[in-house]
Image: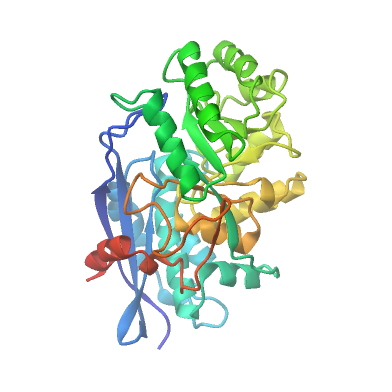
Amino acid sequence: MPVRITDLREVTRPIASAIRNAYIDFSKMTTSLVAVVTNVERNGRPVVGYGFNSNGRYGQGGLIRERFAGRLTGADPATLLDDSGDNLDPDKVWAALMTNEKPGGHGERSVAVGTIDMAVWDAVAKIAGKPLFRLLAERHGRAADPRVFVYAAGGYYYPGKGLDKLRQEMRGYLDRGYSVVKMKIGGATIAEDRARIEAVLTEIGSQARLAVDANGRFDLETAIAYAKMLRDYPLFWYEEAGDPLDYQLQAALAEFYPGPMATGENLFSHQDARNLIRHGGMRPDRDFLQFDCALSYGLCEYRRTLRMLDAHGWSPSRCIPHGGHQMSLNIAAGLGLGGNESYPDLFQPFGGFPDGVSVENGYIVMPELPGIGFEGKADLAAEMRALAA
């Protein structure tokens, strides 16, 4: 029997928190959880692929249910198959999803498509009976490396959170095996942020490196003022100083900040990524790119981004995606990215690793689970099974 998608389901779930960065708070934050149900059976049950969008962009239930789901379930099943006819072809599925979509406008629809794309890749790898990272490595003619660098993202502004609690948080990440930690800046005065940075650096000492993230808050004058302050410290990177589409600001900042910078999590297409590389002054010998497939049309588009980067002389090892999800972990292990973000204490049950996976000296080892590996995380698997039931 040919492989066929029998249903696509979505549910919007809260991932709310009292935390805030320099731009938004997370008191109303949601995510879309998607299940792509197939007619393939394993152990007497249909194979179901799962996906969800990263934090920072809200759930896309309206777009998924009203616009994209019908394009997929209503497509001729034969047009969605790979050449063998034994599995889905994610690129053909992606093309079906984007039918009658004009170019440009890479905003909320990129999140909706990226969420579905994640579920499709999960299903494809499960049908193949392989971990996604191994499937990707095989298809790209490279050796999979199950060892992936991860860093701990936190250091948010929080009511009543003073320097002692900030230091305690960062110490907790070190105790769990992380070698790089990240904190927010730009939500306080520059003097207050300097004190917060110095407190963290005193706490972590030589055990770890510190990255800072302004979440696009600064105009050029403020971004430069922070750059002059930050260059006094041995930071891992200075992240997203200004608006993600202000390539001129990013390029100008390089004149004032010689250390590594990072940006890209709020760019949602390979065309926007290309404009960053063309016009943003990013330096391939030291800077990092944070494009997140779950927010930017999925892995099909992310592979186009990687091809564009290669053409411009960038190594995939300079890519460390935003989002902290297992999809990007698989891409990192399968396609040779530089690592992945991690949220040890936030956005549960969607963040984190499969149960039993621990961080050692800043790295995790991917488990040999079919698909993306969601079923290895009990609390997340329970949410997913409920949707597919």
Q: Quadrant of the C terminus?
A: bottom left
Give the x, y percent position of residue 165. 37, 30
Question: Considering the image in quadrants, where does the N terminus appear?
Answer: bottom left
* Above or below, comparing residue 280 to residue 345 in the picture: above
Residue depicted at x 28% and y 57%: 10
How many numbered callouts?
A: 0
The residue sitting at 41% across, 63% down in the picture is: 354
Q: Residue 100, how many percent across, how many down?
A: 44, 52
Query: Along the horizontal axis of the image, is 374 left or right of 259?
Result: left
83 to 242, vertically: above or below: below
- The residue lying toward the viewer, choosing from 358 and 41, is 358
Where is residue 278 drawn, in percent x and y? Answer: 71, 34
Residue at 49% x, 17% y is 195
Q: Residue at x 33, y 59 (%)?
A: 34
Give the camera-side residue of 358 and 252: 358
Question: Going by the image, does 311 lie left or right of 195?
Answer: right
Q: Position of residue 315 (x, y in %)?
A: 72, 49
From the viewer's side, name the closer residue of 58 and 218: 218
Question: Is any part of residue 123 visible from this angle?
Answer: yes
Instruction: Kindly indicate the quadrant of the structure image that contains residue 119.
Output: bottom left
Closer-to-camera residue (380/248): 380
Q: Residue 308: in sight, yes or no?
A: no
How is the protein colored in the picture? Answer: rainbow
